[in-house]
Structure formats: structure tokens, C-alpha cells
Image (cartoon, rainbow, N blue to C red):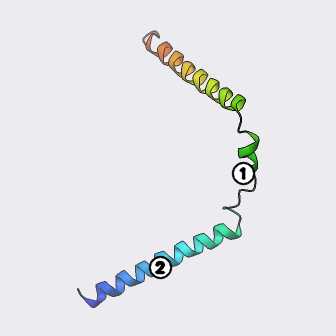
Amino acid sequence: MSNSIMILMLTVSTFLGALGLAALIWGIRTGQFDDQSKFIDGSRYDNEEDLHDAAMMDEKKKAQEAKSKREKEYGPPD
């Protein structure tokens, strides 16, 4: 392999590594990885009633999607 290709590959990989490091440092400084309410909300909304409500909402959503799909199929032609 020629030296120019090796130099190009090293330059590009170093640039991409530096770009990734800069993005990581930016994310840490701006608080992109801070989720202070994750564990509190996990324990607060972790009971059977909330699970049942979520399942009911999912069923309603699926029923509504099926209903709108049937209405589109039986609509008058344009």
C-alpha cells in the first residue's frame, strides 16, 4: 500500500475520532446525558393500574386505526 493512502487514512480516522470526542464533550457539558427524573418516574409510575391504563390506551389506538382504515376502504371513489 502506498504511503499517500496510509497518510490519508490516518488523517481521516484522526479527524473522525476528534469529531466524535468533541461531540461527546459537548453532550456532557450541555447535559444531554443527564436524566435526573428517570428513576423517580420509573418508581412513581410503576404499578398495575398504570400498566392497565397503558394497555387500554394501546387497544383504543389500534381500534381507532382499524376503524379509520375501514372507512378509507369503503369511501366513495374520487
Circle 1 crowding by C-alpha within 10 Å: few under 14, some 14–19, many from 20: few
Question: Where is mark 2, residue-wise?
Answer: 15
For residue 39, above or below residue 21: above
Indicate which disc, 2 or 1, sits on the residue closer to the N terminus: 2
Residue at image coords 65%, 70%: 26
Name the one closer to the observer, 11 or 66. Answer: 66
Q: Using the rendered view, name the quadrant where residue 4 is placed.
A: bottom left
The residue lying furthest to the left in this view is 1
- The reply, left or right, for residue 46 in relation to residue 66 is right
For residue 5, above or below residue 56: below
The residue lying furthest to the front in this view is 48
Name the one closer to the observer, 65 or 59. Answer: 59
- The reply, left or right, for residue 65 in relation to residue 9 is right
Which quarter of the figure is the N terminus placed in?
bottom left
Question: Where is mark 1, residue-wise?
Answer: 39
Return the x and y of residue 25 as percentages of the image width and height.
Answer: 63, 73
- The reply, left or right, for residue 10 in relation to residue 39 is left
Return the x and y of residue 19 as percentages of the image width and height.
Answer: 53, 74
Q: Using the rendered view, name the quadrant where residue 36 is placed.
A: bottom right
Residue at image coords 52%, 78%: 18
- SS at mark 1? helix
For residue 67, above or below residue 45: above
Return the x and y of residue 52 as percentages of the image width and height.
Answer: 66, 27
For residue 52, above or below residue 27: above
Which quarter of the figure is the C terminus placed in?
top left
Residue at image coords 59%, 27%: 58
Q: Nearer the viewer, mark 2 or mark 1?
A: 1
Circle 2 crowding by C-alpha within 10 Å: few under 14, some 14–19, many from 20: few
Question: What distance separates the C-alpha of mark 2 from that of mark 1?
Answer: 37 Å
Give, as a three-letter code, the residue at label 2: Phe
Give, as a three-letter code, the residue at label 1: Phe
- SS at mark 2? helix
